Image: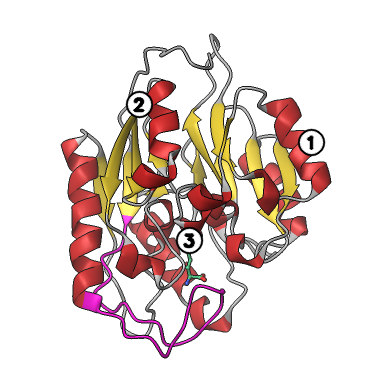
Amino acid sequence: MQGQAVPRVPTPRRYLMCPPRFFAVDYAINPWMDPSQPVSAKVALAQWTELRDTYRRLGHTVEEIEPQPGLPDMVFAANSGTVVDGRVLGARFRAPQRAAEAEHFRRWFTEHGYRDLTMPEKINEAEGDFAWTGRVLLAGTGFRTDPAAHAEAQEVLGVPVVSLRLVDPRYYHLDTALFVLTEATDAAPAQVAYYPEAFSPGSQQVLRRLFPDAVVATSADAECFGLNGVSDGRNVVLPLEARRTGLGETLSRCGYEPVYLDVSELRKAGGGPKCCTMEIRK
Ligand code: ARG
């Protein structure tokens, strides 16, 4: 696979997103957030709109949930639900500032006909820390999601869960350090991209065993939120900076099509493309 371009086939996705109309950095719950630096909700909304329109242009469906005043991080929809095969596992946030987001998303799912919906008992920041590979659910812990939430996710979603330990506070969610490029099929295993140093030595070994063909990212790739990408199996939405770090080029060599977007304003809250994007799998 390495070095040789493989034909990559995109599959249509369904995403849930939340426009950042009340975006702000009023508190700091990760090392990227600095409430003393100026932030523009207008610029954030423009960058977010470009992201949403890019997904639509690529043929994906984007649903929108109404943002709420007083919840400036609600734009990071990935943190509010994990949906596999139409089964929804809601969220329970670690930070009190974000706690109320979970209920807004629960209501959205209920109103949109999702009957199979469970709200977690354990701290669970959803797709921030859970990544579906098509076979197993990779699950991060160390900063946000409680390790006990991994077992809870396995029971609720009925899929095997593989726990991974994050060790660098800058990469506080799994989706800041790893993303799925191609989901596994009967014909081929999943392919992921990740930044090894964000994980404990044991978890690095697990990742090497599970994904010998992974795209291994550098610290520069990780620092610009390049591991917060969104792939449809072919097109990979990445922060603009991933063009110069080499990540985009590496992905091109593997047959993917990088799509670069400016998400600099959203990064002031510690987020990138994936954080803004919850995937609804059926
Ligand atoms: N300010 C948010 C927080 O710290 C950013 C969340 C980013 N989302 C993500 N999926 N990594 O909770």
Q: Along the line of sight, which residue is nearer the eye, 98 or 170? A: 170
Q: Does the magenta-highlighted stretch encompass residue 21? A: yes
Q: Position of residue 252 (x, y in %)?
A: 37, 26
Q: Is residue 233 visible?
A: no
- At label 1, the amino acid type is Gln
Element type where label 3 sits in the image: helix
Residue 63 lies in the magenta stretch: no
Q: Amino acid at mark 2?
A: Arg
| For residue 80, above or below residue 239 | below
Residue 218: which quarter of the image?
A: top right
Q: Is residue 20 left or right of residue 95?
A: left
Q: Is residue 210 above or below residue 282?
A: above
- Reply above or below: 123 against 192: below
The answer to whether residue 251 is visible is: yes
- Image coordinates of residue 209 in percent, x first then y, are 75, 27
Element under label 2?
Answer: loop
Kindly state the secondary structure of the residue where label 1 is placed. helix
Asked if disc 2 is less than 8 Å from ligand 1, the answer is no
Task: Please give the label number shown on residue 234.
Answer: 2
Residues marked 1 and 2 touching at CB (< 8 Å): no
Q: Is residue 236 above or below residue 228?
A: above
| Upstream in sequence: badge 1 or badge 2 | 1
Check disc 3 and report the residue beneath it: 80
Instruction: Give how far across and how far down residue 177 sits, in percent.
Output: 57, 50
Q: Nearer the viewer, mark 2 or mark 3?
A: 2
**In the image, farthest residue toward the bottom:** 36
Q: Earlier in the sequence, mark 3 or mark 1?
A: 3
Name which residue type carries label 3. Ser
Give the label on residue 205, or none. 1
Q: Main secondary structure of the magenta part?
A: loop
What separation in Å lies between label 2 and label 3 (alpha carbons)? 26 Å
